[in-house]
Image (cartoon, rainbow, N blue to C red):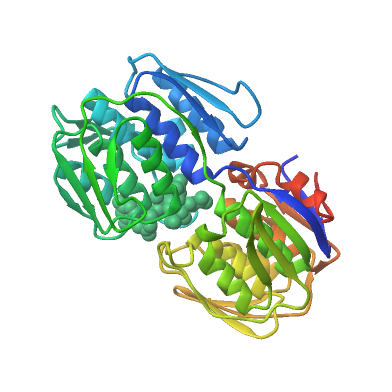
Amino acid sequence: MDRIAVRQSGPLEGTVPISGAKNSVLKLMAATALAPGEFLLHNVPDIADVTWMGELLTTMGMTVERPAPGDLRIVHDGTLVPEAPYELVERMRASIVVLGPLLARYGRARVALPGGDDFGPRPIDMHLRGLEELGASFEFAHGYIEARADQLTGARVLLEFPSVGATENVLLAAVLAKGTTVIDNAAREPEIADLASFLNRMGARVLGAGSSTIQVDGVEQLAPVEHTVIPDRVEAATFLAALGVAGGELLLAGARHDHMDMYAAKLGEMGMRISPDSEGIWAMSTRRLRAVDVSTLPYPGLATDYKPLFVAMLATADGVGIVTENLFAGRFRYVDELVRMGADIRTEGHHAVVRGRPLLSGAPVRAPDIRAGAALVVAALKAEGETIVGDAHHIARGYERFVEKLRAIGADVRAC
Ligand code: EPU
């Protein structure tokens, strides 16, 4: 069952429940290393990345269980082996975010160095420089980072780029540091604000999360809490893209329009109608999309995670659109797969020029990563014949019940 078969579909109709945000819950799980006791998280998606982060916490000595669907209980008895082994970090780069909390609470950490991935190299130099500003030191041996900090001390950390991971690692360390830390040029993603609100409930003093300056007044200790994870804006964006391609009318239950207003505005330019609703986001698409140009930027700009969705939408839109990637150098690998489906796309450096065609042609393709995999399924909704998306395990890393949710709104999709 590592493949998804898709046939031309539409119009899509109905309600899609939007799950909790992958890129928030993984960091909240890491943050539980900061305090002993019992944490309870709600709205936790049942996806592979959550399972793997759970395995990492278990390896370190915590108990992780699902008492009910959507809930995750994490128990930390105050003694952990502060180590993230290669097998887990290599599988999921987000594991690097345990570095900050382990250093803050245990004064040391041994974490495997993450490698590159399908987007190209993904360095962690800004994470390390930020933690060094707080007094940590690092040695590198046998593929591992050996980190130490007898006492973390608040400092000003100026990030060279508003990196999500670096902002989170520094924030997670600063909450238990002595004195005040100011993170300048911090990432502003809603997942960072969610992490800060989780930390504040634990007793931390974090101000300004969600803006580019975050101030953290260190405290001596933190306590466990209960928390509901924010909705996944990229999952919501994926269903909106599916609607754009296949047409119809959807309600994305639980989604937050204010977390994705730039994306909604772009889809509006392309001819869709989207508005916030008391239950989530309402959207309608009644005609072939119009081509637009798109450029990815850190939040509140258009997320790099939306980019494969735009390329998929533009592949059958009316006109020519230029998509520019400003975050990850190699994030165009799925384009070759779309070309196999008959899409007219040329890439040059950071740009893709997409000439819309009325209809693609179903073909066997492979998902290179989570978002690109989902985008191939979206594109296949407007491809004649059958498309088989292989390596669908990538999609399962980040999308809960993807096939089931698509089928429930009328898409001709099945796992095979
Ligand atoms: N960068 C550095 N040095 C660093 C850190 C980052 O050069 O120390 C560079 C990266 O190579 C990249 C850019 O800065 O070119 C942005 O990276 P960032 O640190 O912001 O990304 P991340 O924390 O590694 C998170 C999400 C990604 C999402 C990006 C950008 C998680 C687990 N991952 O990654 O989500 O694309 O932010 O918004 O939160 C996904 O969900 O599929 C996914 C890849």
Residue 78 versus residue 312 in the image, above or below: above
Q: State the quadrant of the N terminus.
A: top right
Q: Is residue 289 visible?
A: yes
Q: Is residue 133 left or right of residue 54?
A: left
Residue shown at 23% from the left, 38% from the top: 174
Along the line of sight, the residue nearer the viewer: 366 or 372: 372
Q: State the quadrant of the C terminus.
A: top right
Residue shown at 55% from the left, 62% from the top: 306
Q: Is residue 240 left or right of residue 102?
A: right
Residue furthest to the bottom = 319
Query: Which picture quadrant has residue 411?
Result: bottom right
Q: Is residue 163 left or right of residue 239?
A: left
Q: Is residue 143 visible?
A: no
Query: Which picture quadrant has residue 109?
Result: top left
Q: Is residue 387 left or right of residue 227?
A: right
Residue shown at 79% from the left, 70% from the top: 361
Q: Position of residue 348 (x, y in %)?
A: 48, 77
Q: Number of numbered discs present?
A: 0
Query: Which picture quadrant has residue 211?
Result: bottom left
Residue 393 versus residue 55 in the image, above or below: below
Q: Position of residue 120 (x, y in %)?
A: 43, 57
Along the line of sight, the residue nearer the viewer: 151 or 332: 151
Q: Position of residue 205 (x, y in %)?
A: 27, 38
Residue furthest to the front = 278
Q: Position of residue 412 (x, y in %)?
A: 84, 55
